[in-house]
Structures are given as C-alpha cells and as structure tokens.
C-alpha cells in the first residue's frame, strides 16, 4: 500500500512540478520531503538527493514559491537551520487523489 501511495504521490507531484516548468530533481525533492515523518533541514535533503546544499536550497526555495513547501528557520548557537515540510496545498492534493482512488476502486 505504501509503495502504491509513493508511486501515486510521485505521479501527482510530477504533474504539478511540470506545470511550474521544474526539473526532475525538484520532483524528487518534493517527494522526499512529502514522505518524511518530520520537517527536514536543507542538508538532509541535499544528501538524500545527491546534490550540494546550495543546489538543494535553490530548488527548495522554488518549491516554496510555488506553494508546495513551507519553511521554518530556527536559530542555533552556531547559525540558522532552515527546515522544509509539505504545504497544506501539497497535502490537500495528495488527499484528494487518494480519496478519488478509493472512491473509484
């Protein structure tokens, strides 16, 4: 069931991302953040996707601008850590598709 939901979520995010003219890397980032159990710092996203933190940060900002992610900045004694999580819009899209799939099954 989880694998099916992952596939469905990936397909939906790919369509949404394509509408914003985004890259496959952004689709991978969006899916990774959506499936995470908690907000993720930029460094974790970069490591998981295999890009530098600077590249991940640029993609994350564009996904935030598109309304698909929200960010939270937390100050630490050594600096600031930026965390990202799915927006209400992203969650609503997946829920609507999930409900549609259940209704049509």
Image (spheres, rainbow, N blue to C red):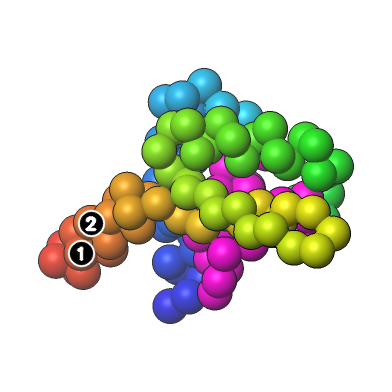
Q: Is residue 62 visible?
A: yes
The residue nearer to you, when weighing 53 against 30, is: 53
Task: Please give left or right for residue 8 compared with residue 101 in the image.
Answer: right
Q: Which residues are magenta?
A: 24-46
- Marks 1 and 2 sit apart, C-alpha to C-alpha, by 5 Å
**Residue 96 shows which numbered tag?**
2
Q: Is residue 69 magenta?
A: no
Disc 1 target residue = 99
Residues 63 and 80: in front is 80
Which of the two residues, 97 or 72, is positioned nearer the viewer here?
A: 72
Q: Residue 102, image x and y in percent? A: 21, 69
Main SS type for the magenta part? helix
Q: Quadrant of the N terminus?
A: bottom left
Q: Residue at x 40, y 51 (%)?
A: 87
Which residue is situated farthest in the left direction here? 103
Residue 78 picture location, percent across and down: 84, 59
Q: Are marks 1 and 2 in contact (CB under 8 Å)?
A: yes
Q: In the image, is residue 52 above or below residue 72? A: above
On the question of residue 101 being in view, the answer is no
Q: Say if 46 sits above or below 60 in the image.
A: below
Residue closest to the far bottom = 1
Q: Secondary structure at mark 1?
A: helix
Q: Position of residue 40 (x, y in %)?
A: 64, 62
Image-quadrant location for residue 66: top left
Image-quadrant location for residue 4: bottom left
Q: How many badges with numbers are in the image?
A: 2
Residue at 80% in and 37% down: 54
Q: How many residues crowd around disc 1 within 10 Å: few (fewer than 14), some, or many (20 or more)?
A: few
- For the residue labelled by badge 2, is the local secondary structure a helix, a strand or a loop? helix
Where residue 2 appears, as percent x and y from the top left, is: 48, 75
Residue 39, by quadrant, is: bottom right
């Amino acid at each position: 069931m989880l694998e099916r939901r992952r596939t469905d979520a990936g397909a939906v995010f790919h369509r949404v991302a394509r509408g914003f003219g985004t890259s496959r890397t952004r689709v991978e980032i969006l899916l990774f953040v959506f499936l995470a159990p908690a907000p993720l710092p930029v460094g974790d996203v970069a490591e998981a996707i295999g890009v530098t933190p600077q590249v991940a940060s640029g993609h994350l900002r564009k996904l935030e601008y598109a309304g698909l992610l929200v960010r939270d900045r937390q100050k630490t004694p050594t600096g600031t850590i930026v965390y990202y999580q799915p927006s209400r819009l992203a969650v609503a899209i997946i829920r609507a598709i999930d409900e549609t799939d259940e209704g049509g099954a």
